[in-house]
Amino acid sequence: MNGTDAMGVSLDTLMGTAYGDAAGSVMPPIYQSSLFTFGSYQEFEDRMAGRTDTALYTRVQNPTVAAFEAMMAKAERAEAAVGFASGMAAISSTLLAFLKPGDRVACVEHVYPDAYRFFERMLRPFGIDVSYHPVEAFEDEADLLRDVTLAYLESPSSVVFRPLNLAKVTAHARRHGALTVIDNSWATPVFQRPLESGVDIVIHSASKYISGHSDTVAGVVVSSQAHIAKIRDLTLPLLGAKLAPFEAWLLIRGLRTLGARMRQHEASAQLFIDRLATRPEVLKINAPGANTVPGLTGRSGLLSMELAHGVDIRRLADGLKLFSLGVSWGGFESLILPAEVGLRQAGEQNSMQRFGVPANLVRLSIGLEEAEELWADFAAALTESAA
């Protein structure tokens, strides 16, 4: 990974550090236990009174989960972290810990669709006002966050991948006393550490690049000890969306290779971007890279493009052999997601419709297969789709 910690240890080395036990294991054991017992009345009393913090009950605390949380906190240069059963559990538990009826939320446009649905179907009926604003407004309107309780950010934003100058946004937020929360799933701590730009709370859908194997659904929140303590005290135990020990163990496995995987995703994405830029079928590529905004040091394998009129997107998707149709991203496999499919999602108006995502947009997750083979597959299908 890029950078070193305060002791001069690279994050690649940090993530590979052994968490062995007395048997010499290089991986922490899986504590697949619902509860933990105590050797004496005094030990039990001390724990229940909060004088100690030894493991008590896996809904709120587990040694395997704690090992993952410690690794995530170090990766993001945070004081503490707390794991959840999904990215949405991390989002909802964080917002419900810090918001109350009458509060106001300012959210970036093109937010993750399920986060948008949570804002509209859960927060708004509870009396919390939510407004949506483009990237430029967050950066340039100094008074946008006046009387705002919480600014909910993504950088880059979903689907269209527009990055934010986080230092400018957090400066406005501090001036008005607004809490800043960001979803950092796209960049990961490898390419962006928002806390260093002044963001208060960082959220990850750990199902994506943190896991990296498409076999885990999880979320994690990293922040100060005080903010994490509030989440642990209120929403983690009472909403119950805890991270399970086995999933935490899988996430530890994923973190140990995160740097290497992200650099390969970046290299393969760069190959695609360079070649897509020469194709007449492609009108626009959405894929921010290193130094697009301060603090962003690289790009992930998730990008989107707008295709020219006449390209048959259905034919393109069905013609691919190495790309599968599917949601999510961040694993070994390469995926394609046409926006026109998302725009047909049943139910309430989703964020893609509200914020004008064009129907000719296609999202790609460039996986870890051999890049030249992926390109040959995509180029052939693209040519055929425009014939």
Image: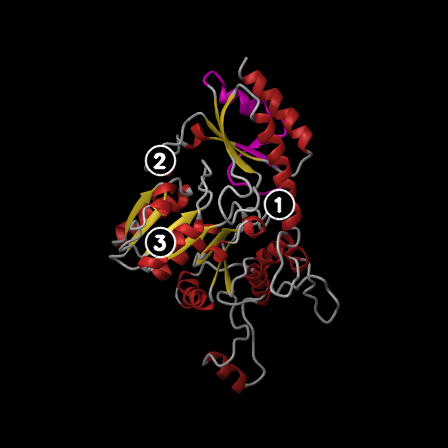
Rounded to the nearest whole Å, what is the CA distance between mark 1 and mark 2? 29 Å
Q: Residues in magenta?
A: 309-336
Tag 1 secondary structure: helix
Cβ–Cβ under 8 Å for marks 1 and 2: no
Pointer 1 residue: 262
Closer mark to the observer between disc 3 and disc 2 = 3
Badge 1 or badge 2: first in the primary sequence: 1
Badge 2 is on which residue?
A: 355
Give the x, y percent position of residue 376: 66, 24
Measure the C-alpha gap from mark 3 to mark 1: 31 Å
Q: Which of 209 and 78 is in front in this view?
A: 78
Q: Position of residue 11 (x, y in %)?
A: 63, 57
Q: Residues within 10 Å of mark 1 (few under 14, many from 20)?
A: many
For badge 1, the amino acid type reads Met
Q: Residue 172 carries which label?
A: 3
Secondary structure under the numbered disc 2 in the rendered image: loop
